[in-house]
Amino acid sequence: MLKIQELSKKFGGVHAVEKFSFEIKPNHITGLIGPNGAGKTTAFNLITNFLPRDKGEVFYKEELIKKSSAYKLVKKGIARTFQQIRIFPELTVKENLLLAMSHDYDNWWNSFGNIDENLEEERIMELLKEVNLEKYLEEKAGNLSYGQSKLLEILRVVATNADLILLDEPAAGVNPTMLRIVEKLILGLKEKGKTLLVIEHNMPFLMGISDEIIVMESGKFLCQDLPEKVQKDPKVLEAYLGG
Amino acid sequence: MIEYIFSLIIITSIWTLLAQSYNLSFGLTGLFNLGHIIFYGIGAYTAAILNTRYGIGFFPNLIFAALVSGAFAAFFGLLTLRLSGHYLAIATLGAAMIATVVATNWVSLTNGPLGIRGIEEPEFFGKIIQADSLEFVVLMLIIVVFCNFLLYKIFNSPFGRIQRAIKDDEIAVRAVGKNTFAAKSWSLILSAAFAGIAGCLYTHYRLFLDPSIFALPEIIILILMVVVGGRGNFKGAILGTILVIIIGELPRFIGFPDNIIGATRNLLFAALLIGTMFTRPQGLFTFFTEKE
């Protein structure tokens, strides 16, 4: 589904990501872990073209992803969330989601007119009901709580209809009740045939939902295995706990 | 007195259109473009040159002014829209200063500092509509209301939604698959086209045009109108324009000597801007237009 070969990025003299290679299978949830500063988010940025890569290649469904504008990847079926929540606070919850799903508007001329958005609204309500946010349909996104904003950001990615979803710390700062909703949402996406790559520091959460785990350390690939094996791998323990 | 009232309505109408056009790119999309006055000036010069040299009348000139300003904005956008925030502001402010220099020194085209005279008044089915007449007021109002209607549709369309999202977070807009460069370019082009129409209205009202149309104070007044009204707030830009023009006329009514009216007006504008920024940075007119 997604194949990364020798991905590299330097910031000045620092190798943020160095010859990082891995592959993820379709309809799997793959966790990406590593200590702080391991280069996980940089790798996400390189895969999704939010940062230009110095070297390396990204293949999605066997197709080489060129270094081009980030927005084009969504049309190919790759979408992502961010470590810091990026919702549109001045737009309503409904507008946040409409923006993600309104592919008819890619024709600019259409986007000036009044397009019937009833069909989209039905889908939006379905999405919101999955995470109990339906009563906030017309609420400004900026008025949502932190956890609700996280959910909205994930829903927005879902609304793009992408097949490959990259989630950057979806459980960070989320209370236990909300965490269960996030977990249910992610597992539900897998059931619908989506493939997910998830960065997360909440190990019990990630190990519970992942089919496989990739470990990064100092910008490099350390290992890739089943969650139960990764947790016992001495190299991983050393990377996290130090010598 | 009636001529003064007519003149005030006409000037307010033109500024309303100009401020609303600026509200599209600056208010809705969040482009900190300090060169918007260039598009107004280009529209004005397009109308003046086409009218005095080729005899093209007011109504075709409205379209030509919009097209030329919009085309220039497309080129201007290619050069500047990769920039954002303060960088964009400085680059566009520099462009506004260059525009003044060009208008002053390209004498063969603009007649330089002496300006262009002999611009004709609008003609409607053979009847000349004189500036400061009731017919002229009605004509201006019809055009400005129609343009504002089109802008209102743009503000409230899916296109407008993308622009508001860009103002919130451009990176997130890219993350949902939208081409933000194209969206910002369209915002600038449309904004410039309406500014060009406002410039054409100005030209055919004043019947004289010189490079002072590009002057820096005009940009400040424009920013004031949009900020006071509330950036991105459609009704706010109209109300902000009316308020700024009324405040600008106050010194005349209070009876200030002519030689200090200009300075007093600037003081009042500065006080209004500072007061707004301190008390209601979201705009003075968002109380009853919050839903927008």
Image: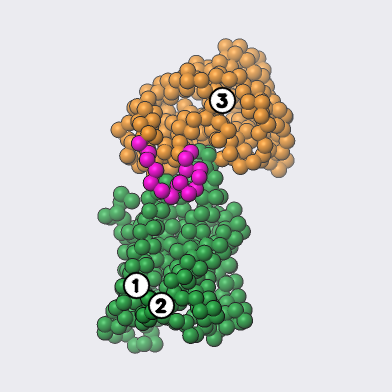
Q: Are marks 3 and 1 on the same chain?
A: no
Q: Crowding at label 3, few (<14), some or many (≥20) Cα neighbours within 10 Å?
A: many
The numbered mark, 2 or 1, whose residue comes first in the sequence reads: 2
Q: Chain of mark 3?
A: A
Task: Give the structural element (helix, strand or loop) at label 3.
Answer: strand
Q: A93 or B1: nearer the eye?
A: B1
Question: Which marked residue is nearer to the observer: mark 3 or mark 2?
Answer: 2
From the top left corner, tell me how far across and down residue B5 is, in percent: 28, 79
Is residue B29 left or right of A119 when viewed as pictured? Answer: right
State the orange chain. A
Q: Amino acid at mark 2?
A: Pro
Q: How is the image coloured?
A: by chain
In this view of the protein, can residue B52 be seen by the observer?
yes
Chain part drawn in magenta:
A103-118
Q: Amino acid at mark 1?
A: Leu
From the top left corner, tell me how far across and down residue A19 is, in percent: 72, 29
As measured in the structure, the alpha-carbon distance from the residue carrying label 3 to the one carrying label 1 is: 61 Å
From the top left corner, tell me how far across and down residue A201 is, in percent: 53, 25
- In the image, residue B51 sits, relative to residue A33, either above or below, namely below
Chain B appears in which tint? green
Q: Residue at x 29, y 85 (%)?
A: B255
What residue is shown with label 1? B139
Q: Residue at x 54, y 54 (%)?
A: B185
As measured in the structure, the alpha-carbon distance from the residue carrying label 3 to the one carrying label 2 is: 64 Å
Q: Which mark is residue A197?
A: 3
Asked if disc 2 and disc 1 are in contact, CB closer than 8 Å, the reply is yes
From the top left corner, tell me how far across and down residue A195 is, in percent: 54, 23
Is residue A51 left or right of A194 when viewed as pictured? Answer: right
Task: Give the structural element (helix, strand or loop) at label 2.
Answer: loop
Is residue A106 left or right of B221 when viewed as pictured? Answer: right
Q: State the image quarter where residue A179 is shown.
A: top left
What residue is shown with label 2? B122
